[in-house]
Structures are given as structure tokens and as C-alpha cells.
């Protein structure tokens, strides 16, 4: 890892940490209140707040995980910087697409 | 005791040595070479913990053998002594230290003067924060024990390792040195300080009680700010 990746990884971690906290609290709230899927969708559909909340979450998590996976690959597989970077980027794109699909599914009206 | 014999593809062989009071691991290795098998290869020079040449793997851990008492490390009267980990084995207990020292050079471990002999001698206050940081890390004897103990070195052959980075940290804190930004650039690249996982095996086993983990953490901070300010 070089300093550029290090800064990005710390930065995205700093973004993710509070979002995870809010996410967990929301799950807790939703189950406690016994909200149904329809109740939840009623709150998220068309909401710019939830769209940006989970949008930022997905982007930060995809970047963070890409850098982490790249590190694991350079240390624990025979791949070097380039190969590990490519493979990890592929994984990151997949993660982003899956996340973005989920966000779109719950926020599009 | 069992000693590693041969090169990379060698094996452990067993020897019986007398148990004496106040005996170091280096003493028993020397006993084998003097009395049992003169072809045994190993390194030492000072025998008093200054030169850093006698490091070996003793019962699974890298140790300076001239200052390690048998009584402290033997388990049930047994010792297993091999060459240092993470370095190519030449023969028996000797390793090829070149990769270790080449990484000191890559980390720009050499002092670069910023003045000439015509200049006034620079006054350095021993109690200035930079000098305190440099002093805390300066007593390295280049023994490679930390390098052998580091898992990141094992996993990533490009990783500069604790000793070279610890050395870079002392120079970054030396106000007389004139190559700070080149050095920060060298240690901020792939395989540099950001590869360290802060496992602390290095500081756990450093015979000089240095703390390379702390030095590396210092480099991480310094390089990060230099990067954010666009200096490197
Ligand atoms: S703290 Fe860093 S340098 Fe020291 S053993 Fe761990 S990974 Fe290696
Ligand atoms: S930092 Fe400690 S363990 Fe590492 S080479 Fe220097 S003296 Fe040896
Ligand atoms: S022989 Fe010099 S440090 Fe051990």
C-alpha cells in the first residue's frame, strides 16, 4: 500500500463508521416498531435523504473494500501490485453495482 | 540441541553439549564448532551485543545469541537453533543479509548532509522534540531480528521492513539532514511504511528495546501530511 491508498482507505473508513452506526440504529428501530416492508418502502421511496445516505455508504464501502482486498491479495496470493489492483477493482465494481441496485430498489418511487 | 545444517533445503541435526552455568546460546554453538563439527557455519564478531551479527532463530524466535542465556530460552534442556527467517539461507546458521541492507538503501537510510565543513557546527538541543524522537530510535545494531520477526516481511517481499523504516524515521527527525522529502517519498511508496500492520513483533523482540512500530507510525503520519499538502 502506498500513501495515496492509505489516505483513501482511512478517509472512506471515517465516512463509513458513522453511517454504519446510523444504519444499525435504524434496523433496531424498524424491528422494534415492527415496521413491515411496505412501511419501510413508504418512508424510503422518493426520499432524497435515504438515497444520498445509502448512496454515499455504497460508494465509500466499495472504495474501502477494494483497497482492503487489494492488500490481502498482495500479501496472501502470488499476485503483485498490478494484478491484485485489477482483481480488487473488479470486485469493487461488483460491490458497487450490487449496492447501487439495492439503493435504487428502495428509493426509486 | 538441534542445529540447522545445509542450505535452504537442509535439516535439523542433533548434538549433545555440556550444560554449564552462565552459558549463552552463542557459547553452545561455538562448542559444537570447536569440538564436534568444525564445518559448522555461523556468524559472530563482538560477543557483547554491539555488532548485530550473531542473530539466529532460537526455539522459534529470533534472538541475539551472544546475549541470550541458555537457561532463559531452553525448554526441558533442549534448544533448536536455525538461521534467521525471511532471509535466504547460505549455509547452516548463516543467512544472506543483502536484501535486508538493500532495503536500508531503498528507504534512504544514509545521512545526506545539508551543510559543508566550512559551515558553523549546528547546535542541536537534546531536549527538542525532533531530537528526542530520533534518539529513541537511534541505537539499532542492524541485527535483522525485527526483520525476521515481521509477518509483513514474510508476506510481502517488497516491504522495506521495521529496521530500515526505523532508520528512516531517525533521519526524518535529524534537522541536519537535507533529504527529507526524497526519504518521505521513498517510504510512502508501495512496500513502504503503510504496509505495516502494527503487529509489534518487531518491538517485542528487538534486543535494543527499540520500538520500530512507533517509528513507522510516525512515518505514516508524516508522509500522510506531506502527501495532503502536496509536498510528496
Ligand atoms: S509492527 Fe510493522 S514492522 Fe513491526 S512486526 Fe508488525 S508489521 Fe512488521
Ligand atoms: S531495530 Fe532492533 S531488532 Fe531491528 S535491526 Fe535494529 S536492533 Fe535489531
Ligand atoms: S556477536 Fe555482536 S551482537 Fe552478538
Image (cartoon, rainbow, N blue to C red):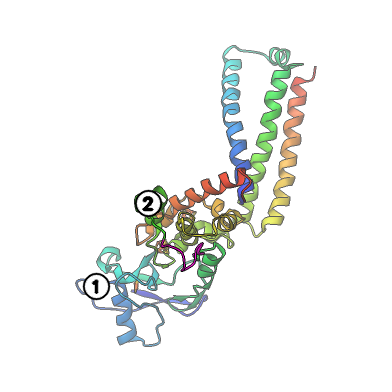
* Tags 1 and 2 touching, CB below 8 Å: no
Rendering quarter of residue B144:
bottom left
Q: Where is residue A54 in the image (x, y as percent from the top left)?
A: 69, 26
Assign ligand 2 to one image quadrant. bottom left
Closest to the observer, B45 or B183:
B183
Q: Where is residue A77 in the image (x, y as percent from the top left)?
A: 63, 57
In the image, which residues are magenta? B111-121
> What is the spatial separation of the Cα atoms under label 1 and label 2, in whole angstroms?
36 Å
Total residue callouts:
2
Q: Mark 1 lies on which chain?
A: B
Relative to B36, is B162 above or below? above
Closest to the observer, A26 or B17:
A26
Q: Which residue is found at the position 56% from the left and 53% from the top?
A: B195
Per the image, is B117 magenta?
A: yes
Q: In this view, does B84 lie to the left or right of A41?
A: left
**Quick check: can you spot residue A88?**
yes
Q: Which dot marks residue B132?
A: 2
Q: Position of residue A23 (x, y in %)?
A: 61, 24
> What is the chief secondary structure element of the magenta stretch?
loop
Rendering quarter of residue B135:
bottom left
Crowdedness of circle 2 by 10 Å Cα count: few (<14), some, many (20+)? some
Of all residues shown, which one is farthest toward the left?
Answer: B21
Q: In this view, does B77 lie to the left or right of B187?
A: left
Closest to the observer, B178 or B168:
B178
Q: Which dot marks residue A17?
A: none
Q: Is residue B116 left or right of residue B209?
A: right
Residue at label 1? B23
Q: In this view, does B39 lie to the left or right of B17?
A: right
Relative to B212, is A104 above or below? above
Q: Mark 2 lies on which chain?
A: B
Q: Which residue is found at the position 68% from the left and 38% from the top?
A: A62
Amino acid at each position: 500500500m502506498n500513501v495515496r491508498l492509505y489516505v483513501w482507505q482511512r478517509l472512506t473508513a471515517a465516512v463509513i463508521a458513522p453511517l454504519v452506526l446510523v444504519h444499525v440504529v435504524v434496523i433496531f428501530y424498524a424491528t422494534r416498531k415492527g415496521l413491515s416492508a411496505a412501511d419501510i418502502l413508504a418512508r424510503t421511496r422518493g426520499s432524497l435523504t435515504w438515497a444520498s445516505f445509502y448512496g454515499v455508504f455504497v460508494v465509500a464501502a466499495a472504495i474501502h473494500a477494494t483497497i482492503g482486498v487489494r492488500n490481502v491479495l498482495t500479501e496472501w496470493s502470488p499476485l503483485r501490485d498490478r494484478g491484485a489492483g485489477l482483481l480488487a477493482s473488479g470486485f469493487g465494481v461488483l460491490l458497487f453495482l450490487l449496492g447501487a441496485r439495492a439503493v435504487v430498489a428502495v428509493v426509486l418511487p | 540441541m538441534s542445529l540447522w545444517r545445509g542450505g535452504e533445503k537442509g535439516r535439523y541435526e542433533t548434538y549433545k553439549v555440556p550444560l554449564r552455568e552462565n552459558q549463552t546460546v552463542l557459547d553452545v554453538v561455538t562448542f559444537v564448532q570447536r569440538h564436534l563439527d568444525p564445518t559448522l557455519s555461523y556468524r559472530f564478531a563482538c560477543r557483547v551485543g554491539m555488532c548485530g551479527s550473531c542473530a539466529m532463530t532460537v526455539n522459534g524466535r529470533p534472538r541475539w545469541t551472544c546475549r541470550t542465556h541458555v537457561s532463559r530460552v531452553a525448554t526441558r534442556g533442549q534448544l533448536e537453533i536455525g538461521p534467521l527467517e525471511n532471509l535466504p539461507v547460505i549455509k547452516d546458521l548463516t543467512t544472506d543479509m543483502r536484501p535486508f541492507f538493500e532495503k536500508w538503501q531503498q528507504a534512504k537510510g544514509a545521512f545526506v548532509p545539508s551543510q559543508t565543513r566550512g559551515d558553523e557546527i549546528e547546535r542541536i538541543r537534546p531536549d527538542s522534540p525532533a531530537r528526542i524522537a530520533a534518539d529513541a530510535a537511534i541505537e539499532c545494531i542492524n541485527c535483522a531480528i525485527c526483520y525476521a520477526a515481521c509477518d509483513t516481511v514474510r508476506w510481502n517481499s517488497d516491504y522495506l521492513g521495521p529496521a530500515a523504516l526505523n532508520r528512516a524515521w531517525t533521519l526524518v527527525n535529524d534537522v541536519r539532514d537535507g533529504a527529507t522529502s526524497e526519504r518521505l517519498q521513498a517510504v510512502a511508496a508501495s512496500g513502504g511504511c503503510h504496509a505495516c500492520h502494527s503487529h509489534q513483533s518487531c518491538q517485542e523482540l528487538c534486543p535494543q528495546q527499540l520500538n520500530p512500530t512507533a517509528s513507522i507510525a510516525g512515518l505514516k503520519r508524516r508522509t500522510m501530511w506531506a502527501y495532503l499538502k502536496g509536498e510528496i
